[in-house]
Image: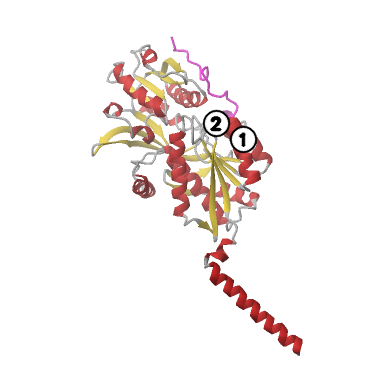
Amino acid sequence: MFREKRGNAWAVMLLIGVFSMVFLLGPGYATAQVKPIKVGYLAPRTGPAASNAKDMVDAMTMTVDEFGGKIAGRPIQVIVEDTEGKPAVGLVKARKLVIEDGCKVIAGPLLGHVNNAVSPFLNEQKIPFLTNAASPADLTLQNLTPWMIRTVFSGPQLSHPFGEYAYKVMGLRRVATISLDYAFGYDVVGGFCKTFQDAGGKVIQKTWTPLTALDLAPYLAQVDKSADALFSLYWGSFSLRFVKQVVEAGLKGKMAILGGVTTVDEHCLRNMGDEAIGIVSSCNWSAALDTPEAKAYVTAYRKRYNLDPSYYSEMSYSLFKWLFLALQKVDGNVEDSEKLFKAILSLKFNGARGPLELDNYRNANQNVYIRRVDKVGGKLQNTVLHTYPNVKQNWIWPMEEYIKRPEYSRDYPPCPDCK
């Protein structure tokens, strides 16, 4: 009897001690013991794509806050690492995120060559990898790895509809192209040229400018002025120079100026003037998109950052929304990689840019918008002219046929009408 009473007394004293400890440490003590959901985010925060990476990280932070910083009672912890835009650095940072930080899912890294460096390691570790590398196309075709998902788009995916639109709607028949001389340029220009030629149009000239070219004037001076339009692919400071120098070269007004996904993206429009007005482009996003989801996102982003969200912002926002919605489906169990991976694959939802779902090769099907730069209320915007719904990476071709084609390059598709 004595021992039983003494045991009860000790139990009471223990409970008093526990409650005292919680009181002293504060109400956050108990929740602090819940393991966070750790996500690694690779981004080129230094180097030529640093401003794009800032848009990406800002949008990610906004998405975390939109979900209240928690999923299934577990705090969300996103660890951002700078790849510097270099493959070797990206691999070191990916290893650090997985091995040292214990991240169970990785997102990023924007640049295709960095993606190729980190993907084999993440696949070996069986880590779900949500890539936002928009090029090359073979990431979700011939070189698809088992644990990778692309929630953005393949390089040519947004250009395929534009080539058809240029011929059938704009009435263009002869087009010259000019682009940065690297893989993303080959994919974007190649996708446009393929469908433009298939529709009956002629590509009469292709010009490739080096990534080291600080002055585009010598290249623009060589553009064939008999063309109905000039299709371009630039980004960042390259876009700013291109849009100014195409006017200086006397090309604007003599031919239509067309742009690939990044040429007049919102990250460029912020620093452009009236010289950009009238440029027509294709993209999966526009900050002027007139849907409830887009308006809500743009309003919140403007309030928070005093900027229009770029496609870099939106792709990061939708990527993390995709991930967090999948994590909700598995009750925050990020440790069960296979279950989480299946949840991501099965998810369909309306993002800011429109309806989103993955194809059988784990690339996002999505809307493509044909846009024109207009000045509205004293401000430049990408006005949506036409929507191509639910565009697939293989466009209208059977996947079995598309996957066997050569990759888009300087020489593919062929240019029989080039001089």
Q: Position of residue 116 (x, y in %)?
A: 60, 32
Q: Is residue 141 visible?
A: no
**236 in relation to 173, above or below:** below
Determine the image quadrant of residue 219. Answer: top left
Q: Main secondary structure of the magenta part?
A: loop
Q: Position of residue 405 (x, y in %)?
A: 57, 25
Residue furthest to the top: 419
Look at the image and give the residue range highlighted in magenta: 398-419
**Which type of secondary structure does the marked residue at label 2 adopt?**
helix
At x 61%, y 56%, the residue is: 333
Residue 112, labelled with which disc? 2
Taking the magenta stretch, the answer to whether it contains residue 169 is no
At x 37%, y 45%, the residue is: 305
Q: Label 1 sits on what residue type? A: Leu
Which part of the image, by quadrant, shows the N terminus? bottom right
Which part of the image, by quadrant, shows the C terminus? top left
Q: Position of residue 218 (x, y in %)?
A: 38, 13
**33 in relation to 187, above or below:** below
Taking the magenta stretch, the answer to whether it contains residue 402 is yes
Q: Is residue 23 left or right of residue 381?
A: right
Residue 91, labelled with which disc? 1
